Amino acid sequence: MLFLLSVAIAVVAFFAWRSAARKVRAERNAAYQTTALVAGSIAALFVIIAISQCITVIPAGNVGVVDFFGTVSDNTLKAGINFVNPLARVVKFSVQTQEVKEVMDVPSKEGLTVQLEVSALYHLNPEKAAQVYKTVGENYAEIILEPQFRSVARGVTAGYEAKALYTSEREMLSQIILVDLQKLVEPRGITVEAAPLRRVGLPAGLTQSIEDKLRAEQESQRMQFVLTKEKLEAERKRIEAQGIADFQTIVTKGISEPLLRWKGIEATEKISNSPNAKVIIIGAGKDGLPLILDTK
């Protein structure tokens, strides 16, 4: 509309300038010089305005959708300077990460009502901006994302006990909400990046009960660990004792009386060959082994 108005004013001002200029030349009337100057300035100004309507600037982090009297172009405008039909309307969409936050009362598996504060980080898929504009409009987050977000959050929490929202399973629930939400809204052109659980408000008294239960479970796990450790230590000692007993049995079986006598004879022979003075009495010792008497 501004383009047409600018063109019309520029045309009128141009003809006014030309008429005044002719009169200045024909009649040499200085009074028309001011009229010609003003008309020419107005014509030039509105020509510039008309030309500016053919140029649009898309800010960083945005894309532009061109709507020409209801006909939407599938080609979106990128960030920067773009030349467009001056009669078309350019609708700008942010493709930066945005946040939608919900505080809701959700049911748990055991029927308790839990107050949940959860967020969804999302951005518009720039390749589907034209589709979103045609099928949903500019308020796509309010129409598509927020209702689905609330529905998914309630559906996921209904399958878990309140304890899961309070313990380490919280991150797992966040991932389930994220995946389920992505399946619903990404085909519509909305990319969900994360769905963090920010705060969980449990009924009065339930928090303490959960903490007591968790402490009891941790103590039970600790005792189980201690018992397992003691059992392993007892098994180790049993195996060690069995090994010692087996060794003693093998050694005992290998030492016979003839062997001991033979070793005694060998020892006697070595002693008899030594230079020291001694008296050897054969057969006088226990079991018939020699007795060795030193003469010194």
Image: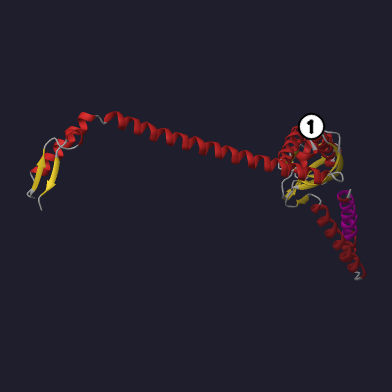
Residue 279 seen by the camera: yes
**Segment tinted magenta in the rendering:** 3-18
Q: Nearer the viewer, residue 160 or 151?
A: 160
Residue 287: x %, y % from top left: 20, 33
Decide whether the magenta segment is chiefly helix, strand or loop: helix
Q: Nearer the viewer, residue 26 or 127?
A: 127
Residue 73: x %, y % from top left: 78, 37
Q: Quadrant of residue 205?
A: top right
Residue 222: x %, y % from top left: 64, 42
Q: Residue furthest front?
A: 284
Q: Nearer the viewer, residue 60 or 146?
A: 146
Left or right, residue 151 beside residue 259: right
Label 1, on which residue?
A: 159
Left or right, residue 276 beside residue 101: left
Q: Residue at the spot x=87%, y=66% of the render?
A: 37
Residue 121 seen by the camera: no
Please determine whether, in this image, residue 39 is positioned above or below residue 77.
below
Left or right, residue 277 beside residue 73: left
Q: Is residue 202 magenta?
A: no
Q: Quadrant of residue 34?
A: bottom right
Q: Is residue 8 magenta?
A: yes
